[in-house]
Structures are given as C-alpha cells and as structure tokens.
Amino acid sequence: MNFKKISTAALIIAIISCFFIFDLGHYLSLDYFLSQRDEIIQYAADQPVLSAATFFSLYVLVTAFSLPAAAVITLAGGAIFGLWKGLLLVSFASTIGATLAFLMARTVLRDYVENKFSHMLSRVNEGIAKEGSFYLFGLRLVPLFPFFAVNLLMGLVQISTLRYFIVSQVGMLPGTFIFVNAGTQLAQVNELGQILSPTLLISFAALGVFPLLAKRLLEKLQASKQLRAYAKPKTFDSNLVVIGAGSGGLVSAYIAAAVKAKVDLIEKHQMGGDCLNTGCVPSKALIRSAKINHHIKTASHYGLSVQESSVDFRAVMERVQTVIDKIEPHDSIERYTGLGVDCHKGEAEIIDPYRVKVNDQIITTRNIVVATGARPRVPELPGLSGAPYFTSDTIWSLREKPKNLVVIGAGPIGCELAQSFYRLGVTTTLVNDIGRILPKEDADMALLVRQRMESEGLPLKLERKAVAVHKTENGYELELQHANETERLPFDCLLFSVGRIANTKGFGLENLNIDLSPQGTIKVNEYLQTSMPNIYAVGDVVGPYQLTHAASHQAWYAAVNALFGSLKRFKVDYSVMPWATFTDPEIARVGLSEDEAIAANIPYQVVRYGIDDLDRAIADGSDFGGIKLLVQPGKDKVLGACIVGTGAGDLISEFVSAMKHGIGLNKVLGTIHIYPTMAEANKYVAGEWKRQNVSAKALSFLTSFHRWRR
C-alpha cells in the first residue's frame, strides 16, 4: 500500500474514531439542536455569512466521512436558513461531501476490491457503462437508501468524478428539497416523529418510482428520435413480422399467434432452418446409424456372435433425409398457417423499421424480429477452389462413401461428424489447430471423449494448421503445418467445421445502420432490441450461444417484449444455459466450467464421481466417463456441472433444474433415484460432496458416542 492510501486511510480512521470517542454525535443530534434551537437561529441572523460557511463546512465533513448525522443536519438547515437558502447550502455541501467520500473510497479500497471481487464488479461496471447516469440517479432519488453506501460503492466502479458529481447533484435535489422543507417546521415541533408524517413518507416513496419513470421517458424519447426519420403508418398490416423460420423465428411466430397477434413469417429457403435441415436432426440420425454399427462391431463384448456388418452408405444418408422428412411437418407452412401465422416463401427486405417487402408485397408492421441464423465459415485456403469440400450445411447431399475424409475443426460439430463417419467405415482424420478437442469444455472432461475416439482408432491431428490444398495425380492433399514442419494428408472429401458467421446482410438491415458486435453478430440489449427500438433479433444471428434451445429461449423474450413491451418488459436470462455434444460418450454442461471460474476469480470446490463405478453403467457396458461439479465452498449450491458418459445430455437436466430453482445438493441427495439407472450417478456425486464436507469434529464425536453406547 502506497503513502497516499496509508495517509487517507489514517485520516478516515482518526476522524471517525474522534467522532465516537468524544461523543461528538451528541452535538449533532435532534435533541441537542432542539434544545439550542433559538440561540442557533438567532446567531445565524446576526452572523449570516459566518454561520452559513460554518454550516456548509460541517455538512461537507459529515458526508465526506459518512458520519451518522446528515439527516438531522439537513433538517436543521431548513430550520436555520429557510427553504431556499437552506436548499442551496445543503445541496452543494452534500454533493461535495459525497464526492470526497467517493474519492476516498476509490483511493483506499478500489484496487483491493477489484482484485478480490472482480467477477462481481465486472457486472456492475457493465451496468454503469450502459446506463451509469440513470443507475446512480435512481439510487440518489430513493431517500431511505443509505447515501453513504452509494458513495462508497461508486468509488469502486468505473465512473468519472465529474459525472458522479453532476448526477449526484441533480439526483439528490428532490430528496434534499423535501428534507429541507420539513426542517422549516422544526420551530413548531419537538420530536422527529412529528416531521415524518404520512404525507411526507408518501412523498419519499414516490421518489423511488421517479427513476423508473424517468428512464422509460428517456427511452421513449431516444426511440422517437431514432424512428423520426421514417414515416410511421397510420395503421399496420401486422403486429409482428418475423424474418427466418428456424427455431428462433418459429417460436417467435408461434407465441405471437398464441396471443392472437397478427404475425407474418418470412422464409426464403426451408422451414425449420438449420436445426431441421442441416443441423441437429440430420446429425443425430447419422449418429444413431453410426452407433448401431459400432454396437454390432463390439457385440462380442456382450457375449454375442454377430457376422461382420456391412454399411450401405447411400442407405444411411437416405435414412437421414427420411428422418428430416418425417419431422418436417412439425415446422411446415401448413402447420403454422393452421396456428394463425401468415407464412410467406421468399426473400425479405427491410425497407424501414415499419415496412418489410417480400416478393411483390409490402407489409407494414409495428415490430420486426430478425431470426436469420448463421452459416458455416469456410476458410480461404490456397488451392481450395475446385476441390471436393463440404460444410455441415452441404455434407447431407453426400451419397457416395468417401475414401479419405478429413474433418477440419474439433468443436462439437466436427467431433460428432468425424466419429460418426469413422464408425460407418469411412477412413476419417480429425484435424484441429490447437492441442485439444472441444475447447469450450474443461480439458480434463474433453480428454475423456478424446480417449474414447483414440481407443477406437480415429486418427487425431492436433496442433496442425491447414494452410493449403494441393491437386495431385491421385486426387487432392491437404497441407498441414506443425511448428516448422509440414505434412500432407490425401483426401477425396474435406469437411469444414470451423465456426459460423451470422447472417446480417442481404435483407436490408445494413441500410438502417443497425449496430453489430465485434463478433459480427447483431448487437442487442437485455430485452433483445437492436439499436432500432422496434427491431428485435434472436438466435445464431445474435448469439452468444449457437444452440437451438437458446434461440427458442430468446424467442419468447423477443416476442413478448415486442408485443407487450409498452406495458411490461422482460430481460433475457442466460444464467442457466445447458448444452451437450452428442459424441460417444456424450459430454454435457451447465453453468461454470473450472476454467471460467479460475478466469473470473470465483471460489469453488470440485466434486467428482466416476461413472465406471455405477452399477447400471457396468451392466450396460457403458462404464466410462464421470461427473464433475463445481460447488460453492461451505455450501451445497451448484455453480456448474459437467457430465461425460452415456446419456449425459439427459442426466444434466437434474442439475439444470437444481441451479435454476436453487435446489442444493442436500436435496438432490435426499431425492429417491430409481435403481438401477444412470440417473443414480447424480445422487452419488451429491453423496461424494456430502462426504467431503462432513465435519471432522462431528465424526470424532460420533465415534466417541457409539463407543460409549457399546
């Protein structure tokens, strides 16, 4: 700690100590003031300048050092100097004192608090950055909130001193006015209870509503300013136009129709979007075929003798399409038309915030939801043009079995498809430019999946960067770079799984200057509004999660806020967002990973349970994997859970519910789980937590107790 911090801290301690040691608060109490009231008022009349300067200095001192006397002095200011002069003195003195307290807190405590509670302060700083003035303004306007705490808190966050001074000056003025005005009545009362009348208390409570009203008013003014340049229709064809019929768009339209709003849904390609046509559904159908073939090949492990399986690759891929066709009616135009949605097949063009063109029709609408999704990213590799390459969107057109498939990218999609094609007898190699697979998961849990892949013989080329494609006499080769060495992999089929790009262009959005994030997604606020207030966005085009269920989750908030936001709005909640990767074994997670907890400096306790010890897993031959929990130290609150094993995507649901509804591990342990099931693993990991947290003293006492009983 430097000299500035030490000296400031010493001054604060000295002044506060003197205040209490010498009982100086006695002289700043209401009883003392009432006993000296007439003499003080007379002195102020005889010495107006000196008395005002003394009062002003005293007030600054009291507020700067957070001494418990500000309310009484404010009342006294009204009694001594009258309403307007008292208001002037108290208003500026309180703001100067508050700013000094703010600066002292920043000098003494800020570095320590930032290091100790960075994960908490980061959220506060985000709020300050977005709406710091309104946030502080609201705190200042609530008269029953301890203002000294506001001074200390704001000193720890990222807000400028000048901004703090100005907002505090304005924000405290209404409350100061009420208190000073109440103080003018001190000549007629003898105790504080007579000042805090029901009328004044109602006035104080009304001040708490004022920040909310002020914030909404400012938002209305900002929205009006942004929309002023566009001609607003006198009547509207639709309450809501939804662009894109993937999971986010379909749910938005469904909710709007369910509440009897007039909704138009526009899709230029296929209803159901990526999930139905090129993502979740086809990949799971492929995984199922691959898993069955794997079971046939490993049948001897179960005491079965099965003839060598033969994979009809074309039939497998045709089955994938059959599954898509069977599910397609769930997302069809016919179904949504029956639900009351006007469906349009064609390209949407946003003309302005109130008008959307599709085909030759212009639809006027109060609100728009953009759900245009994302597309696979294809890196710019020299020699790629003309080579046989696919993405997760186009691989489903494949009918001939590849001789050499190279999958680039070891995220969830790359791992799922590489393992599946390998199990179907395709010579497959998985390439990744870093030294691990599934980088969003903790390394120790992702390693379990890697070990299974390698045990089956799937070649992994990690820490290899694809740099070029070469055409040879025998076909094509992919050039990989590792450190200063290069190698070439022959292929006749290249599959890219290296991320996705948000679809933000080509439908008029760019003409409205809608803000984008650094990641290229549409930037939205906590209500899923874009920078144009009546245009909302959901799903992959927004992020932060590229998950079907995340898009559906966002869609509820966007639709409800668009339709009812003038009455009530809801902030989108990502606090408990689960996901799973459907490799074999599956890996599923919810909440914090250990890497994230370390990065955010969040304390945690790790609890593990190995599924290889579970009776049902052993009986099924699925005794591989484990559960890893992050638990709040000293409590049973789950901060995060990761499961690797058969059915992990289903098993994680118990921890999703526990985190969402505040159910601790004690209650998970106390819940009856059917024997023998995989779900017992959740109970056993809760039991492992219990064993780790049993008090040694309690166990020692119990040992002595039972010895005595014997």
Image (cartoon, rainbow, N blue to C red):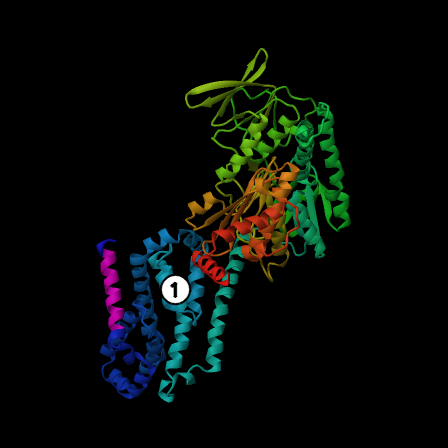
Q: Magenta span covers which residues? A: 4-19
Q: Amino acid at mark 1?
A: Val
Helix, strand or loop status at disc 1: helix
Residue 634 occupies which quadrant of the picture? bottom left
In the depicted view, which residue is nearer to us: 54 or 5? 5
Residue 517 in picture, x, y percent from top left: 50, 43
Q: Is residue 12 magenta?
A: yes
Residue placed furthest toward the top: 473
How many other residues sit within 10 Å of disc 1, few (<14), some (14-19) or many (≥20)? some
Placement of 223 over or under 319, stated as above or below: below
Placement of 320 over or under 353, stated as above or below: above
Our reading of the magenta stretch's main secondary structure is: helix
Q: Which residue is mark 1?
A: 150
Residue 660 in picture, x, y percent from top left: 57, 55
In the depicted view, which residue is nearer to us: 463 or 519? 463
In the depicted view, which residue is nearer to us: 631 or 334? 631
